[in-house]
Image: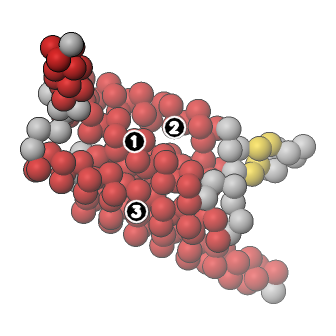
Amino acid sequence: MSSVWQQISNTVVTEFSDLKDVSEITTLIIRLLMAALLGGILGFEREQRGKAAGIKTHMLVAIGSALFVLIPQQAGLSEQELSRVMQGIIAGIGFLGAGAILKGNDEKDLKGLTTAAGIWLTAAIGVAAGLGRESSAILCTLLALVILVTMPKVVDRLEVKDKQ
């Protein structure tokens, strides 16, 4: 009976052996937390504006995208194979974003384009974090925040000048 428990124990250890050392565990934690944090920042901005895709959605998209590139890296996939994974993320997130777009009666009455673009960008930020490109992910997040916060104000000012 003890050999059965030993086999079970060995199987469990083998199943949880994908993180072999503290360095790998630390890398995984940093990259996933970075993706979650950056996605959450963008999601917070969207939620403050009353958009449907808020903090949780953006965080999940960023973490999922990071994990989709982290796991193949851990498994030792080639850059070409990793490229195909990223292509799948880009296309898949496109479908998710498309679900956020609503078309009204008028051709110009489209809603959700910014939300869709934000979800797509959040996935890209998650990929960057997952690949260990944290600085690029942070820079892109800051640039996105500048665009999301300042552009509505710029457009409002331009519209006021046009009306005068």
Q: Amino acid at mark 2?
A: Ile
Mark sitting earlier along the chain (3/2) = 3
The mark total stands at 3
Please tell me whether mark 2 sits on a helix, a strand or a loop.
Answer: helix
- Which residue occupies the foreground of this view, 86 or 26? 26
Q: Are marks 1 and 2 in contact (CB under 8 Å)?
A: yes
**Mark 3 lies on residue:** 37
Mark sitting earlier along the chain (1/2) = 1
The spot of residue 119 in percent (x, y) is: 54, 49
Mark sitting earlier along the chain (3/1) = 3
Please tell me whether mark 3 sits on a helix, a strand or a loop.
Answer: helix
Query: How far separated are the C-alphas under marks 3 and 2?
Result: 19 Å
Please tell me whether mark 1 sits on a helix, a strand or a loop.
Answer: helix
Q: Label for residue 65? A: 1
Give the mark toward the camera: 1 or 2. Answer: 1
The spot of residue 15 in percent (x, y) is: 24, 26
- Which residue occupies the foreground of this view, 11 or 87? 11
